[in-house]
Image (cartoon, coloured by chain):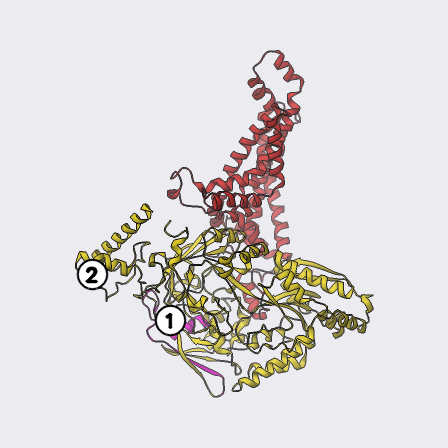
Chain colours: A yellow, B red
Amino acid sequence: MMTKRTWTMLIGMMVAFGLLVTACAPQAAPAPPAEQPAPEEKAPAEEPAAAPEAAEEDAYMTIYGERLPEDAATYDMQIYKVPCDIKGNHITFDFQVAVYQRFCLSDLFQDQLVNLDKDFNVIPASAESWEVSEDGLTWTFHIKPGLQWSDGTPLTAYDWEATYQMIANPEHAWDFAWFYSGVLKNWDEIIAGELPPSELGVKAVDDLTLQITTETPWPPLPAMMQFSFVMQKKALEEHGPLYNSNVETSVSAGPFILDVLEPGKRIELVANPMYKGYRQPRLQRLIAEYRDMSTAFVAFQNYEIDQVGYEWLSPADFEIILSDPVLKENYLRHYGDFRTDYLLFDTYNPPFNDINVRKAFAHAVDREAIVKNVYGEIKAMPAYSMLMPGYPASDTEGKLKEYQKYDCDLAKEYLAKAGYPNGEGFPKLEMWLRNEGPAMQAVFQAVAASISECLNIQIEVSNKDFKVYMDALNAKPTQLQFGAVSYGMDFLDPANLLGIWLSTGRHSWKNDEFDRIVREASSLVGDPEKRKAMFQEAERILVDDVGGVFIAHRWQGDLFQPFIQGDCIREPDSQGIAAWHWGNDWCWGNIYISKDVYNYDTYRGK
Amino acid sequence: MTRYILGRLISLIFVLWVVSIITFTLMHSVPGGPFDEGKQRLPPAAKENLLRKYGLDQPIWKQYLKYMWNALHFDFGVPYQVPTTTVTALIAKTWIITAQVGAMTIALAYGFGLLAGLLAAYYQNSWIDNVVTFTAMLGITVPNFVVALWLILIFSVRLKVLPSGGWSEPDHWLIPGVFSKDWIMPVVAYALAPFSLVARYTRSSVVDTIRSDYVRTARAKGLKERTILIRHVLKNALIPMVTALGPEIPNLLTGSIFIEATFRIPGLGKYFVTSTFNRDYPMIMALVLLIATLWGITYLLTDIVYTWIDPRVRLGGSEGSV
């Protein structure tokens, strides 16, 4: 105790000293970034006697001059540490450089045009407003004035223009190029090298006005702008797209800036003192520590990290979590990216070209038992369709359940109708998995067992290398007869999760009526209710024609330390779910470390 | 001898060339590429752009020739996983850490293994023998990542005496510049298996030797037990051990993904796995060639060590060779 008190006094004295001398250091340790501006409103303490009070007050002040919430720990404790997969393949902090090769704590060096609130409504971020032209083709985004980069350069629409021209440039070879295909004007021609990037339908009209033109009317465009991460035009020209992969050349218009980058070891970001955006952070430092993720839960229990995602928690870890009241209360379950696990078929060839076979499979999966006994109810809910309840146009009332519900007798009937009474003569199948971990392997083993027991057929489960699987799936004609896979959304609109079932998408299933409705609804402007009804009809067709057999919607979640607080994660949404929802990037301006942290022996201050 | 060594080095170059062809062909025949199509198929034009970016649009023989030409100039390309550096720089930076762990592991495993095996053999069927045999059996059967997790649970989580992982800078070491706490658990976890191997080999070959005629003769001559053990028993027992344990050294020097990942050591080990998963062709090639070179050199050194241990062994000629 003595030592702790001595330290507190020492820190207090250091703060007071700092105030007196420089009048610009709000915290004692660690040292603030060199370029941190002196808050003008804070005059140097004139009388030494007043210094300790000022120091006390200042200990709760962020570098933006905002006071931390009442229950917050001092600013020097506002550090947040996450685990980072040591086996990850990371090269950049920027979505627009390589989506699948991003470092941990990526995309914090800029704010997108829009963000999502707790109920997944699109809310302003860098753009304060937007409107669409009457023909539904041109969207005008008005950027908030006064935003700037950490080097003092103003953030303008020209930065977005340059960023979008970069990602469309064939030389950049962006790994997410399909995302804007058929959406942004001239995108496909530019990717193919037929038009120069300057012809892209993303144009800066002036510093604060960005105009985006689409090929066809595209109502989900604002929702897609959740991915409108911006890069600095000047830095791109001077240092190329990887400018953020180097502390010296990194520049940020987001809440944090890069401080330490040692890939494979650690990454540290500090609050960006030049940041003027909508999510000024209460946290002063973020740390990502590389580790084998099988040790993440142990590290969490040892208070070495502050958060673990559900994907790194094993069934054994969940048992511990559910039996510990504190852990249980701090495991915050959420929709995640509305991920659905399902079975897919090559419906162009036997035996799955027969709808009766597909229906037999759909009715042979005992989802409720599998969710209860294999996933665990904390990790999934049974699925009878593609869209997880809560996603736009999803089947919240369970009307679609009848099309694929578990009914073994019915399943047998369908199989007999297809010419395989009691499974006789049915070919032996191999169910491909896409490099699944042990937990999901167990799930799909159970699915295969449910089908083979009910239908008396043979299914062998084979876990494939990720790229081998995707190559076979994507091949036209497909080389994947029967497999299991999952898909999480890319943007919050049925056009996304139903669009992947179009005959031009990744599945080998074709239904002309489905194609027509989805295409029409995707670009329908002005009548949201009709659009929703059309998507619901399309999804009905999908489950009725058994494009896939839907197994479960994943409940995702994060385990937080009890002292990680903030309305963003602790206050429930309109469905009563309190958690860090997908797309809630504003959370970075909201979460903080509460005083409760003093009750634990954490890495802070060591 | 020099001629022999030169001959072996030339044949090593030939081996490397064959290895390079096999690796290059194999890695390019596995589906997928250094890009991700996990969500949706890339538009054909976008995929072509990606292939062009990585130089994969050329015929395979052209890619191979280009790679080899550059490799001969010690340019092994840019790793797809870390495009801000070169393969050479990345390996140099990470291998130094891995090699350090490896060297400490070798010292610990071979030093203690030898001692334990020797004691177990000398006091055959005593409690010492039982303890060594049991530990060795445990070390061989329990995988090192399990041992690693046990160590973390006991010494970091429960007792809180050792860090659960990490690789700190020399000025943060327990004895700055000399010794770091970070080393203890990874080296112990990593050394347990080779320690067991060495202990078992030493025990069995010492047990064989200790009963041989020349040892009996030495005893009859009235030599001291210690002299008999070190000069006669151990030296003769070393020959089979060199054969069996020499090749372990390149394995240890190139690291273990399990140990490095579990203890957060920023070494080379992870790249053996991630390069394959991510189809990082330049890195795969460089790592395979590195391993092949290490193995070639180790076998050569093993052969040279034979001549030192056993004067009857002669290299490069028929006379007296074994």
* Residue assigned mark 2: A44
Q: Dot 1, crowdedness within 10 Å: few (<14), some or many (≥20)?
A: some
Seen at 45% across and 51% down, the residue is: A265
Q: Work out whether A40 lies above or below A543.
A: above
In the rendering, at what x and y percent does residue A388 appear?
58, 72
Q: Is residue B283 visible?
A: yes
Q: Nearer the viewer, residue A75 or A167?
A: A75
Which residues are the magenta region?
A: A135-164
In the rendering, at what x and y percent does residue A354 appear?
76, 73
Same chain for mark 2 and mark 1? The answer is: yes
Horizontally, residue A114 falls left or right of residue A490, namely: left
Kindly indicate the quadrant of the structure image that contains residue A439.
bottom right
What secondary structure is marked by label 2?
loop
| Cα–Cα gap, marks 2 and 1 | 29 Å
Q: Work out whether B96 lies above or below B84.
A: above
Chain letter, disc 1 residue? A
* Residue assigned mark 1: A278
Horizontally, residue B10 falls left or right of residue A160, namely: right
Horizontally, residue A280 falls left or right of residue B150, namely: left
Seen at 50% across and 58% down, the residue is: A325
